[in-house]
């Protein structure tokens, strides 16, 4: 492990990534690290730059499919408490990149702060949610962002204000490799009313998604004027299978990975769905899922 000499305590080689993603598929990371401090993280990022190694950051893995052959370079997971703090000051909520989005939502609601309650039920971490501008039909996380603290590939910590960042549908203009913290400017509201609205969003979301015990992931962005699920269903693709990968019967924009499934099965099914939807509806579906 010459590339990470001196980091032997926190860097592992050939770490299986299936256990770190919702699909529970894919090969290993060439190198894998879970730093415990900002200083360790900065040193790892700088080492990657020095060694010209690819760097990726993994949250909960709810929006990632790892290829069967694995991932070159270093994969960092910010699971340590130092990267998962949540602080509330007035109407501002600050959350570390590794904090679970669900916890930030419930913390905001508990403190009578409105804005994020519609995001309840979306899996993942704050870092991943901000990077991909997670959202629902009631709004996106980017509209409530006040500032974000990021780490450049040179290992420099900088703060970027909301007006410096582009947010589009399921994408952001944050190009730095690591998000460290996000700050949200919310609105005061009655905690009981917020809790009621949050519960309503939760019930609606969970009733339409694959069962909690299934290994699954949401695949496509919604095109203008329709949802990906509607288009997939109209193309008659619910329940379509390739190997161990199956288009969900409950929500056609999810692919379920059964026990014998491989990442290649999922990739082949994605291409089949895209081609069938294009041929039958004229719409070219775009991926929301990240392929590593």
Image (spheres, rainbow, N blue to C red):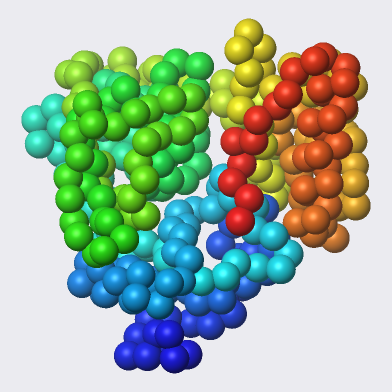
Residue at x 42%, y 81% (from the top left corner): 11
The percent coordinates of residue 156 (x first, y second) are 20, 60
Vertical side of 36 occupied by 110: above or below:
above
Picture quarter containing residue 183?
Answer: top left
Picture quarter containing residue 223?
Answer: top right
Determine whether, in the image, residue 259 is placed left or right of residue 142: right
In-front residue for pair 91/222: 222
In-front residue for pair 71/127: 71
Q: Name the quadrant of the C terminus.
A: bottom right
Determine whether, in the image, residue 227 is placed left or right of residue 55: right
The percent coordinates of residue 63 (x first, y second) are 57, 45
**Can see residue 251?**
no
Vertical side of 76 occupied by 138: above or below:
above
The percent coordinates of residue 150 (x first, y second) are 25, 50
In-front residue for pair 59/191: 59
Determine whether, in the image, residue 240 is placed left or right of residue 106: right
Residue at x 31%, y 39% (from the top left corner): 104
Picture quarter containing residue 70?
Answer: bottom right
The percent coordinates of residue 189 (x first, y second) are 21, 16
Residue at x 90%, y 46% (from the top left corner): 242
Residue at x 25%, y 68% (from the top left corner): 42
**Can see residue 115?**
yes
């Amino acid at each position: 492990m010459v590339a990470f000499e001196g980091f032997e305590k926190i860097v592992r080689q050939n770490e299986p990534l299936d256990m770190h993603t919702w699909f529970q598929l894919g090969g290993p990371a060439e190198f894998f690290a879970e730093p415990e401090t900002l200083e360790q993280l900065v040193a790892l990022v700088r080492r990657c730059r020095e060694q010209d190694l690819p760097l990726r950051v993994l949250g909960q893995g709810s929006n990632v499919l790892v290829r069967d052959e694995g991932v070159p370079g270093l994969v960092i997971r910010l699971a340590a408490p130092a990267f998962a703090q949540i602080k509330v000051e007035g109407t501002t909520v600050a959350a570390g990149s590794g904090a679970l989005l669900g916890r930030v939502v419930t913390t905001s609601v508990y403190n009578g702060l409105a804005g994020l309650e519609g995001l309840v039920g979306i899996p993942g971490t704050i870092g991943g949610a901000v990077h991909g501008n997670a959202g629902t039909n009631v709004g996106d996380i980017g509209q409530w962002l006040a500032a974000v603290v990021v780490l450049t590939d040179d290992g420099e910590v900088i703060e970027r204000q909301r007006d410096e960042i582009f947010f589009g549908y399921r994408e952001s203009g944050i190009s730095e490799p690591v998000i460290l913290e996000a700050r949200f400017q919310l609105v005061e509201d009655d905690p009981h009313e917020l809790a009621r609205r949050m519960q309503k969003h939760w019930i609606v979301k969970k009733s339409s998604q694959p069962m909690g015990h299934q290994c699954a992931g949401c695949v496509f962005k919604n095109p203008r004027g329709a949802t990906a699920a509607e288009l997939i269903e109209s193309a008659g693709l619910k329940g379509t299978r390739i190997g161990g990968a199956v288009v969900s019967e409950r929500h056609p924009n999810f692919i379920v990975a059964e026990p014998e499934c491989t990442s290649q099965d999922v990739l082949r099914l994605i291409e089949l769905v895209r081609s069938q939807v294009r041929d039958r509806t004229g719409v070219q579906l775009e991926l929301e899922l990240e392929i590593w």
